[in-house]
Image: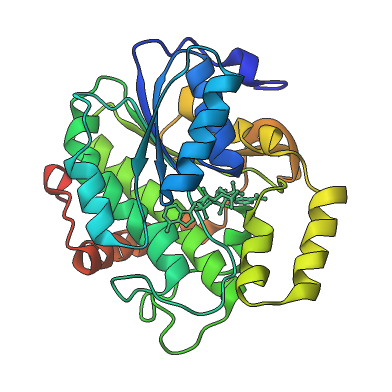
């Protein structure tokens, strides 16, 4: 995969993709490049205004792009259920669980979950489970979940998934990104056990300049942190276009293996897509199983077709 770029994305004609958080950053670029290669792409966004603006930009950048907007707030299970219930397609070739928030001040989702765990993991867990019948019915479908190298800062705490005992915003982010990898691990294991050819894989963008870094400081009114983040993005980060390549690789390259983790080649920081290091705890079957059971219980979404 050395030197792999968006030019290497195979033809996506006839394929349907859903990209969460597609109005900005990595999700926007991933959706745009899938559309450029002929996929019909659903931009799953929480804000109608930001989603419509992104769609407007995309159809100018890619002439003839088939792009729809659908509202999805991953911090509200009612919205996730609504999205899945109204999903119009008879097929779903690719689900990109990309949307995310990072290092926010403590808060909870509409359903009372800590925001980073709720949005980054539980929302995507519920979405994938609700769309599973369509994914299973689509030959060669994939689920790509976007994690981060920052997962290596912390394992999950199965006894305090919602950070009720203590909350540290970076630890909560790291745990949500570990949860993304444990989810991929368990999903891949269950799909294989049920003889399904759906591929569950994970990716991360390294360090890419997007809105992710400034959203948290802005919410907390931490002007100095926001300034530092802007400087970092300006001088050290790669572009969102480059950051989207591992996701696009995991989503479209023919040789992607279940439960693989693709990131930038140069120290997981920047560069073309390559197999990425992951903390050993993200491959722990027991932890993955316990998180799965807890996620089913918390969201009320059960993966009936993939019972253990
Ligand atoms: N950029 C990096 O360096 C980096 C590094 C490692 C991992 N990542 C991961 O990459 C993914 C994409 O992030 P990004 O860097 O592209 O950041 P971004 O530009 O801030 O994009 C995040 C997207 O997620 C959406 N989102 C946030 N909360 C949501 C919710 N409750 N429901 C639905 N959508 C929601 C945002 O929508 P709004 O615009 O409406 O807020 C936005 O579209 C995330 O999973 C992040 O953890 C990024």
Quadrant of the rendered structure where residue 41 is?
top left
Query: Where residue 203 sits in the image (x, y, percent)?
Result: 54, 41
Name the residue at 17% across, 43% down.
85
Quadrant of the rendered structure where residue 2 is?
top right
Q: Is residue 80 visible?
A: yes
Image-based side of 67 in relation to 110, left or right: right
Q: Nearer the viewer, residue 38 or 148?
A: 38
Name the residue at 66% across, 69% down.
218
Quadrant of the rendered structure where residue 120 is?
bottom left
Query: Where residue 196 sits in the image (x, y, percent)?
Result: 23, 30
Residue extending furthest toward the bottom: 165
Query: Where residue 209 sits in the image (x, y, percent)?
Result: 72, 47
In the image, residue 198 sits, relative to residue 83, either above or below, namely: above
The N terminus, quarter of image: top right
Query: Where residue 207 sits in the image (x, y, percent)?
Result: 71, 48
Q: Nearer the viewer, residue 97 or 286?
A: 97
Image-based side of 153 in relation to 231, left or right: left
Q: Is residue 248 visible?
A: no
Image-based side of 283 in relation to 224, left or right: left
């Amino acid at each position: 995969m050395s030197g792999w770029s968006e030019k290497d994305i195979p033809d996506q004609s006839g394929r349907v993709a859903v990209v969460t958080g597609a109005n900005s950053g990595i999700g926007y670029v991933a959706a745009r490049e899938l559309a450029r290669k002929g996929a019909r792409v659903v931009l799953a966004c929480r804000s109608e205004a930001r989603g419509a603006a992104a769609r407007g930009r995309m159809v100018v950048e890619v002439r003839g792009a088939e792009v729809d907007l659908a509202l999805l707030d991953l911090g509200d299970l009612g919205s996730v259920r609504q999205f899945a219930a109204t999903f119009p397609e008879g097929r779903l070739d690719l689900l990109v669980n990309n949307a995310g928030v990072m290092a926010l001040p403590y808060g909870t989702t509409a359903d009372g979950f800590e925001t980073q765990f709720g949005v980054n993991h539980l929302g995507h867990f519920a979405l994938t489970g609700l769309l599973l019948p369509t994914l299973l019915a689509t030959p060669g479908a994939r689920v790509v979940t976007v994690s981060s190298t920052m997962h290596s800062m912390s394992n999950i705490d199965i006894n305090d998934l919602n950070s009720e005992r203590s909350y540290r915003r970076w630890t909560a982010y790291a745990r949500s990104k570990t949860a993304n990898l444990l989810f991929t691990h368990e999903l891949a294991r269950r799909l294989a056990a049920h003889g399904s050819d759906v591929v569950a894989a994970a990716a991360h963008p390294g360090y890419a300049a997007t809105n992710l870094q400034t959203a948290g400081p802005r919410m907390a009114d931490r002007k100095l942190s926001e300034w530092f983040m802007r400087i970092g993005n300006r001088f050290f980060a790669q572009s969102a276009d480059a950051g989207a390549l591992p996701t696009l690789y995991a989503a479209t390259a023919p040789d992607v293996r279940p439960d693989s983790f693709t990131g930038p080649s140069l120290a997981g920081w920047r560069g073309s897509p390559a197999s990425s290091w992951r903390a050993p705890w993200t491959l722990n079957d027991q932890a993955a199983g316990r998180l799965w059971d807890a996620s089913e219980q918390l969201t009320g979404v059960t993966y009936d077709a993939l019972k253990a």
